[in-house]
Image (cartoon, helix red, strand yellow):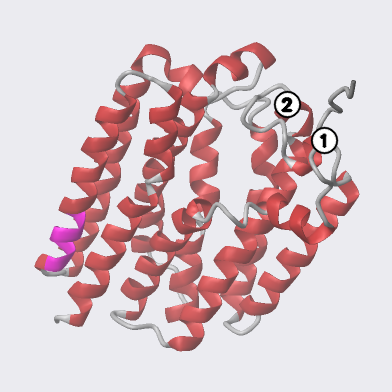
Amino acid sequence: MNSASPVHPAPRGRVALWLDLVRWNRPAGWLLLLWPTLAALWIASAGFPGWLLLGVFCAGTVLMRAAGCAVNDVADAEFDRHVRRTARRPVTSGEIGRAEALAVGALLALASFGLVLLTNALTVALSVSALLIAIAYPYTKRWLAIPQAYLGVAFSFGIPMAFAAASGTVPGLAWWLLLGNLFWVLAYDTEYAMVDRADDLRIGIRTSAITFGRFDVAAVMGSYAIYLLMWGAAGAYLGLGWPYWLGLAAAAAMALWHGSLIRGREPARCFTAFRLNHWVGFAVFAGTVAAYALR
């Protein structure tokens, strides 16, 4: 009589592990970074920015998001092992060592920096600040009540960089757009934090979902509203036409739908709202592109 042997998953190769480390099969993360950066690039250029800047910012965004994932997983390894959704990440599971993960992240960041060198001195200087802000983010969850607000700065720093690269200056409008975008990040990352709230409470991680408590849904919807109002004010200031307002209207409709998804605070529905947020950013970007194209 044969006894069944336990089935163990086949070990993964290094490339597969590296791709998993940088979330290559989950593009929502870099899309959330990309759309506001490109919208700012179009605004700073008053239209199409040229293929060089477009290529630099598209590739640089993907590379820096990948590098950020590697650093984040090293910083959060001890926490991630206690969260069901993150327990199988390569660093947490031990399939990739911390030094190896940091080496992968450093190489990706260096490649991104090489792209920034194709722009100008101001953009290069801002890229160093962006890198330092991104590296510090994982540790803010130890002491900030709303680390998502800090993440909002990190995820919006492509906006002043886009202005610097396109025009050589960073006007007040760039910082206004960054502040508005910060509220969008606060909205969608609070939805993300709502997914893991029970685990985060148990292990002592600080998140906006915990800090806002029973006002979490109201805070998310309020943050969406501030984001859209601030970017709407920027569009009015710039005299952008009806396509821009159509893009904002589409983004607002999606935000309302996300509100219906998260109202019951069910983790799966909150994760769906987070995962689809890049379409909100795309709507604003598409409206921006169309507005300048039809001028």
**Residue pictured at 64% horizontal, 12% vertical:** 202
> x, y (%) of residue 143?
65, 25
Identify the main secondary structure in magenta.
Answer: helix
On the rendered structure, is 161 left or right of 233?
right
Residue 287 vertical position relative to residue 224 in the rendered view, above or below: below
- Of helix, strand and loop, which one carries label 2? helix
Residue pointed to by mark 2 = 79
Looking at numbered disc 1 in the image, what kind of residue is underneath it? His
Magenta stretch encompasses residue 220 = no
Within the image, what quadrant is residue 203 found in? Answer: top right
> x, y (%) of residue 186?
43, 37
Comparing 72 with 222, the one in front is 72
Residue 280 vertical position relative to residue 198 in the rendered view, above or below: below
Comparing 37 with 11, the one in front is 11
Q: Nearer the viewer, mark 1 or mark 2?
A: 1
> x, y (%) of residue 171?
39, 67
- Viewport quadrant of the C terminus: bottom left
- Viewport quadrant of the N terminus: top right
Which of the marked residues, 1 or 2, is nearer the chain's N terminus? 1
Comparing 147 with 103, the one in front is 103
Residue pointed to by mark 1 = 8
